[in-house]
Amino acid sequence: TNLLTGTVPTELGNLQALWDLDLRTNLLTGTVPTELGNLRALKILNLLGNQLTGTLPTELGNLQALWDLDLRTNLLTGT
């Protein structure tokens, strides 16, 4: 817990070698950026316990190395 506020920075999508993005239990708002779909090396994406809204971007389907995705306890919509 870092009590980060604001939105998930789109610039994170530029970190091509990033393999673990853990932003759980903060106060992040807004949508999940489409740019996260650029993180080809990403294995772990943890956004649990924020206030993220909207639907998941289809670009997350590009994360072929991803094996752990946690989006619980947000305000996401869709199926």
Image (cartoon, rainbow, N blue to C red):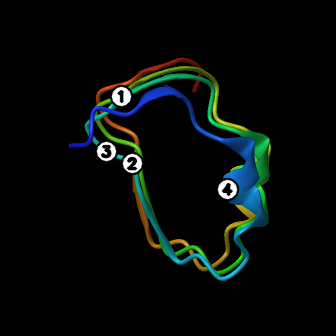
Q: Is residue 9 left or right of residue 27?
A: right
N-terminal-most mark, 3 or 1: 3
Q: Residue at x 32, y 40 (%)?
A: 48
Residues under labels 3 and 4: Cα distance? 15 Å
Badge 4: few (under 14), some or many (20 or more) residues near its Cα, within 10 Å? some
Residue behind mark 3: 24
**Contact, mark 2 vs mark 1 (Cβ under 8 Å):** yes
Which-is-in-front pick, marks 1 and 4? 4
Q: Give the image location of residue 22, x and y in percent.
A: 38, 57
N-terminal-most mark, 1 or 4: 4
Residue behind mark 1: 50
The amino acid sitting under disc 2 is: Leu
N-terminal-most mark, 3 or 4: 4
The amino acid sitting under disc 3 is: Arg
Badge 1: few (under 14), some or many (20 or more) residues near its Cα, within 10 Å? many
SS for tag 2?
loop
Residue behind mark 2: 23
Q: Quadrant of residue 39?
A: bottom right
Which residue is nearer to you in this view: 68 or 48? 48
21 versus 18 height, above or below: above
SS for tag 1?
loop
Q: Look at the image and tell me in which quarter the N terminus lies.
A: top left
**Contact, mark 3 vs mark 2 (Cβ under 8 Å):** yes
**Residue 72 badge:** none
Residues under labels 1 and 4: Cα distance? 17 Å
The amino acid sitting under disc 4 is: Leu
SS for tag 3?
loop
**Residue 12 badge:** 4
Residues under labels 2 and 1: Cα distance? 8 Å
The amino acid sitting under disc 1 is: Asn
**Contact, mark 3 vs mark 1 (Cβ under 8 Å):** yes
Q: Give the image location of residue 9, x and y in percent.
A: 65, 41
